[in-house]
Image (cartoon, coloured by chain):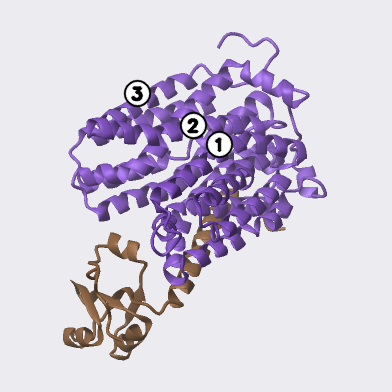
Chain colours: A purple, B brown
Amino acid sequence: MTSVSEKIKQNPMTFALWMMLVCGCLIGLISFGIRSSFGLFVDPISGKEGFQFGRETYAFAMAIQNLFWGIGQPIAGALADRFGPWRVLAGGGLIFAAGLALMTISSDPVTFSITGGILIGLGMSGAGHNTVLAAFAQLMPVDRRPWALGLATAMASLGQFMVVPLGQAFIEAYGWGATLMIMAFAMLTTPALALSLRPKGQGAVQNANAPLTATANSFRESLRQAFGHRSYWLLIGGFFVCGFQLAFITVHFPPYLADMGVSAKTASWGLAMIGLFNVVGSYLSGPLGVWLSRKVLLSWIYLARAAVITVFLLVPISTASVLIFGAAMGFLWLSTVPPTAQLVGVMFGNRYLSMLFGFVFLSHQIGAFIGVWLGGAIFASTGSYLPIWWGGVVLAVIAALLHMPIREQLWAAKPQAA
Amino acid sequence: MVRINTHLGGALLLIGSAVVVIGIWIGVQASRTDPLPTLVWAGDVSDAAVMTASPLVLDQLGNGWWWVYAAPKDRERLRQTGVRIAVAMPTPLAQMAGCSMPPMDYKLSP
């Protein structure tokens, strides 16, 4: 049996592969960072300094944005599988940039929903880090993929962690309109960066022993295989829970802490710990997928989330408990992404991976929508976040159990019962 | 050909990107003329001199460390009094570090 280190020796990272990796990671950092910054614009755009249409209109546009991001992901994936991820990244970057620039003149609710909602949601589908992951899964050598997927997710996490305060500095220094235009120009670098992800004409990629593999001969057949395969449905169910938990914690964690008497400063540190440890966890989960079975890794991640939330709810709340919870949840935050993407590739090959992972991501976004909405609805009716926290624990255990029967092997015409 | 260890390369990419973002942030802050929370170390300067040179003292941390609310011209004046460090910080980071904020209606004199 060939060890991992021996495989790495067989496929050295060439300059072209490094370029591809760096450019793809930068696209993920920029797009995910900008996407994470929209919370900063709520008051400047909807308030007196902006268009004065109120927070509700802004929130509605953001809800549309998330919806179109989720719906657009399988479509962008299908386009990436058909025309190549680099073209979709370039096109998505242009749409994203157009959305950002046009937001500055969208003074009424309808046009704002179109520019800040639909255009940016579709742009994220094309130029988001999911497309980068799909590109790496198709273009990187087989033995480098887990590491590359982990690094790309870590870079996106870094963007989430570092671009938000940078966005705040830009808004304070130059105003929200100029900041959106600066972000639009940053997104315009995407087409240039995407050029290095072209599969043709790159000797490094040809030497990389990274052929396209597929269990199906067409889009339709791959969809039929995937949606007829129990393991794919189990993966979709697990990723739904991931979206549910992350979105609930992102939106409702600060008000929960405020209700518990925790200072805004400690809450900020808790969120910062999530961001920081997310980078570490995302990076490590890629290589861990080499040494561990992906489904076992995912089961452990969800079980660990359940344990972390349970301990956090049971121990008396304090600065230490908030910081430790932030670090532990951050470590487990996006660490589900690389092994989930890898599992799709293991089951169906990488030829239609963009589209098939896009559908898995759609379930993540539906989970995110329900997590945010249900958190608010339950708090409104009961005056407490505890039911939804405990619901998250139960869902995490269910997700861990869902991954166990997944068949971690290439789809076969007559798969045995899982 | 120089071969870079993959994990070392990955770490360099992450750290390098973080350094670039921080560099852009410092550049943006340097271009601002309005006051920001400023971390000051004035180990060799008397408390009275720091308080005189600062438009608004937010916190005295001890061992020569202060939080003051200062614009670029104020930071320059602080440095001229012998202050070693006078670095503007983003407001959220300063708050996370325990810095008190000025009153909402506070206005610096021109």
Of A168 and B17, the residue lying toward us = A168
When asked about the image quadrant of residue A141, the answer is top right
A272 w.r.t. A169: above or below: above
Left or right: where B84 falls relative to B16? left
Using a 10 Å C-alpha cutoff, classify the residue at mark 3 as few (fewer than 14 neighbours), some (14 to 19) or many (20 or more): some
Q: Is residue A30 above or below residue A404?
A: below
Residue at point 35%, 75% (across, down): B87
- Specify few, some or many for label 1: CA neighbours under 10 Å numbering under 14, 14-19, or 20 or more: many
Disc 2 designates what residue? A366
For the N terminus of chain B, the image quarter is bottom right
In the rendered image, is residue B8 in sight?
no
State whether residue A261 appears in this view: yes
Closest to the camera, between mark 3 and mark 2, is 2
Q: Which residue is mark 3?
A: A394
Structural distance between the alpha carbons of marks 3 and 2: 18 Å
Give the x, y percent position of residue A171.
Answer: 44, 65
Binning the other alpha carbons within 10 Å of mark 2 as few (below 14), some (14 to 19) or many (20 upward) gives some
Q: Residue at x 27, y 34 (%)?
A: A379
**Badge 1 amino acid:** Gly
Q: Which residue is mark 1?
A: A70
Residue type highlighted by circle 2: Ile
Question: Quarter of the image holding residue A232?
Answer: top right
